[in-house]
Image (cartoon, rainbow, N blue to C red):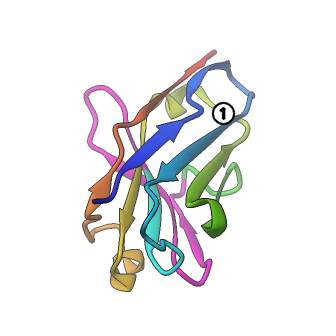
Amino acid sequence: QVHLVESGGGSVQAGGSLRLSCAASTYTYYGTWCMGWFRQAPGKEREGVARIDGDGNTNYSDSAKGRFTISKDNAKNTLYLQMNSLKPEDTAMYYCAADPKRATCTSWSRSFAYWGQGTQVTVSS
């Protein structure tokens, strides 16, 4: 069973930074998996923010490029999202996602099998 637990969310002023973490359950090696961060703001559809594949290749949404950095520590089974220069429009619930299929990381339209419960990020102006 795969469990993903996000942490690191909170309230910050515009221009500030937050680092989100996603701890994955043990007994599974996630190094080859596709891992990603999504977000959903009230009244909006969920959108992909960043993803990273088993080779460490990354992909970002246009809104995240240049401000957010996704990374992972395979030894700790932990995924990160460093968010800098935060804007009020970044306010959302942020979710961690994981999938064992390499192909999941080829497109935002592909579905991730496992999801965390989310962590709230609120950016005030």
Q: Which of 59 and 82 lies nearest the eye of the viewer? A: 82
The percent position of residue 65, horizontal first and vertical second, equals 63, 57
Q: Is residue 72 visible?
A: no
Residue 75 in sight here:
yes
Identified by mark 1, the residue type is Leu
x and y percentages locating residue 83 in the rendered image:
67, 42
Residue 73, placed above or below residue 10 = below
Q: Which residue is mark 1?
A: 86
- Decide whether residue 39 is among the magenta residues: yes
Q: Examine the structure image and report whether residue 47 is included in the region drawn in magenta.
A: yes
Q: Give percent across and percent down for residue 101.
A: 33, 81
Seen at 69% across and 49% down, the residue is 67
Give SS at disc 1: loop
Residue nearer the viewer, 9 or 32: 32
| Stretch in magenta | 38-62
Looking at the image, which residue is at 27% across and 71% down?
Answer: 110
104 to the left or right of 19: left
Q: Is residue 109 above or below residue 1?
A: below
Q: How many marks?
A: 1
* Residue situated furthest front in the rendering: 27
Residue 55 higher or lower than 36, as above or below: below
Q: Is residue 121 left or right of residue 68?
A: left
Which percent across, then down, holds residue 116?
Answer: 36, 45
- Tell me where residue 31 sits by quadrant: bottom right
Q: Is residue 63 above or below residue 109?
A: above
- Say which residue appears at 29% left-offset and 64% top-offset: 112
Question: In what quadrant of the picture does the C terminus appear?
Answer: top right
Q: Quadrant of the N terminus?
A: bottom left
Question: In the image, what residue occupies the spot 58% across and 56% down?
Answer: 78
Q: Residues within 10 Å of mark 1 (few under 14, many from 20)?
A: many
